[in-house]
Amino acid sequence: MREFFIENDGIRLHAKLDMPKGWQDGKKCPLLILIHGFTGHMEERHIVAAAETANDVGFAVLRAEMYGHGKSDGKFEEHTLYKWVTDALAVVDYAKTLDFVSSLYFSGHSQGGLLAMLIGGMRADDLKALIPLSPAWMIPDGARQGCLLGMPFDPRHIPDQIVAGDLRLNGNYVRVAQTIHVEDEIERYPGPVLIVQGDADEAVPLSYAKRAAELYADAKLVIVPGDTHCFDRHLECMTEAVREFLCTVEGIPE
Ligand code: FER
């Protein structure tokens, strides 16, 4: 494992690169970029499980923490989806400089899954496949309708702060989210997509995953019966879906 920082405009993004078992210098392999969700970080159980699964089937995995999360720079309450988008673009740029990479895949959980959908459209030429896990596609709708984190607000007169329990979001988070139209980026991504979500997800409505799977040119939706937003109950169903998809797309015998 290599631990380091990727820089984006003076902001240091904490990253870890794990090579697959048996990898030797000079050999090539595919690389999966993997991003956590809102309030999340790279050591969460479901993130580590997805990373280990990819490593297991011969992928290198680059986990990176976005602005205001984990050990990266920036304050949580000042993060916005634009900052995450430019961070993720910097991570893709970095990944493209790695000599061993044969192809790039992008996965993220929840807000990181929404990010995967956006970056997929923006970097369609660079990304062989996308894996949005419980993608939080409803955030832009919530921002436009005036409800985020369960807190109602006037979407035409955005407050300086949204406060929900211990969580504090800047009004700019909402302003930015209101401008984001994920359908446009879905349309721009022609490659294979795997969406995995539990049907007992308490944070993101499953209807968004179903709609995304219909709109993508080549998507598979795996619904995990009885599972939560972070796959607390049937983690192995999520990792099995990821394993099978990576092997199929990459042509690896399972
Ligand atoms: C929300 C519901 C879920 C929200 C964000 C999320 C900012 C993100 C969840 C995650 O990334 O795990 O209302 O508003």
Image (tube, rainbow, N blue to C red):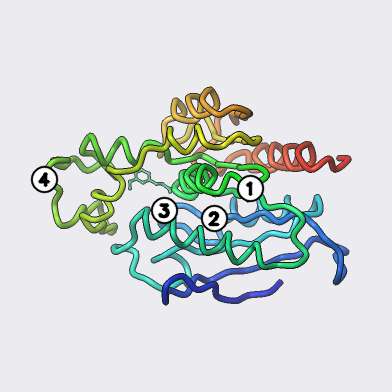
* Viewer-side label of 1, 2: 1
| Residue bearing mark 4 | 157
Amino acid beneath label 1:
Leu
Amino acid beneath label 2:
Ile
Mark 3 vs 1, N-terminal side: 3
Amino acid beneath label 3:
Phe
| SS assignment at label 2 | strand
Q: Is residue 234 above or below residue 109?
A: above
Indicate the position of residue 242 as horizontal and vertical percent values.
Answer: 69, 41
Which residue occupies the extreme top position in the image? 214
Instruction: Work out whether residue 71 or residue 132 is closer to the camera in this orientation and state it.
Output: 132
| SS assignment at label 1 | strand
Mark 4 vs 2, N-terminal side: 2
Q: Residues within 10 Å of mark 3 (few under 14, many from 20)?
A: some
| SS assignment at label 3 | loop
Q: Is mark 3 within 8 Å of ligand 1?
A: yes
Q: Is residue 93 above or below residue 241?
A: below
| Residue bearing mark 3 | 38
Q: Tell me if label 3 and label 1 are in contact, CB under 8 Å.
A: no
Q: Residues within 10 Å of mark 2 (few under 14, many from 20)?
A: many
Indicate the position of residue 75 as horizontal and vertical percent values.
Answer: 33, 69
| Residue bearing mark 2 | 35
Mark 4 to mark 3 CA distance (whole Å): 24 Å
Mark 3 to mark 1 CA distance (whole Å): 23 Å
Going by the image, does 121 lie left or right of 240? Answer: left
Q: Tell me if label 1 and label 4 are in contact, CB under 8 Å.
A: no
| Residue bearing mark 1 | 127
